[in-house]
């Protein structure tokens, strides 16, 4: 799900105060982790995920996989934390 820069900016503001709801550990991106991310997106629409990967390229690869496999849009990432957005059937977040 591609997000425009205006949408991304708005979602970054909303995600600023959020805490990570899912942590991708040393085992990597397993089916259970993807299921939890999918469920969290379905419930919250906008979530943060902590990704414990060794280097920046591996983190970016995991971010791309999460985004593709959960049909969500990547909002931002700072360090080991990434934010994702997927609108619910009845959206709570209204994009500008």
Image: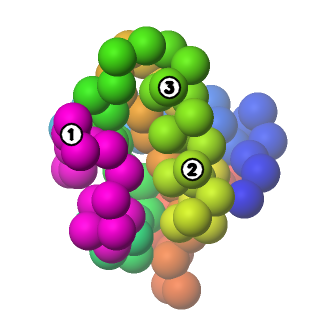
Quickly name the residue at label 3. 58
Q: Which residue is mark 1?
A: 25
Q: Position of residue 5 (x, y in %)?
A: 76, 33
4 vs 82, left or right, is: right
- Helix or strand or loop: what does disc 2 sit on? helix
How many numbered discs?
3
Residues drawn in magenta: 21-35
Q: As displayed, is residue 15 above or below residue 42?
A: above
Q: CA distance from mark 2 to mark 1?
A: 15 Å
Query: Could you classify mark 3 by the number of other residues whose Cα lies within 10 Å: few (under 14), some (14-19), or many (20 or more)?
Result: few
Mark 3–mark 2 distance (CA, rounded to whole Å):
11 Å
| Residue at image mark 2 | 65
- Residue 35 occupies quadrant: bottom left
Q: Using the image as rendered, state which of residue 40 and residue 18 is in the foreground.
A: 40
Mark 1 residue crowding within 10 angstroms, few (<14) / some (14–19) / many (20+): few
Helix, strand, or loop for circle 1?
Answer: loop
């Amino acid at each position: 799900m591609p997000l425009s820069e205006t949408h991304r900016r708005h979602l970054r503001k909303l995600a600023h105060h959020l805490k990570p709801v899912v942590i991708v550990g040393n085992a990597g991106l397993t089916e259970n982790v993807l299921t939890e991310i999918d469920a969290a997106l379905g419930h919250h629409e906008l979530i943060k995920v902590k990704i414990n990967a060794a280097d920046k390229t591996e983190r970016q690869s995991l971010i791309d996989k999460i985004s593709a496999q959960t049909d969500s849009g990547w909002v931002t990432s700072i360090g080991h934390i990434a934010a994702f957005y997927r609108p619910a059937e009845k959206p709570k977040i209204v994009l500008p």
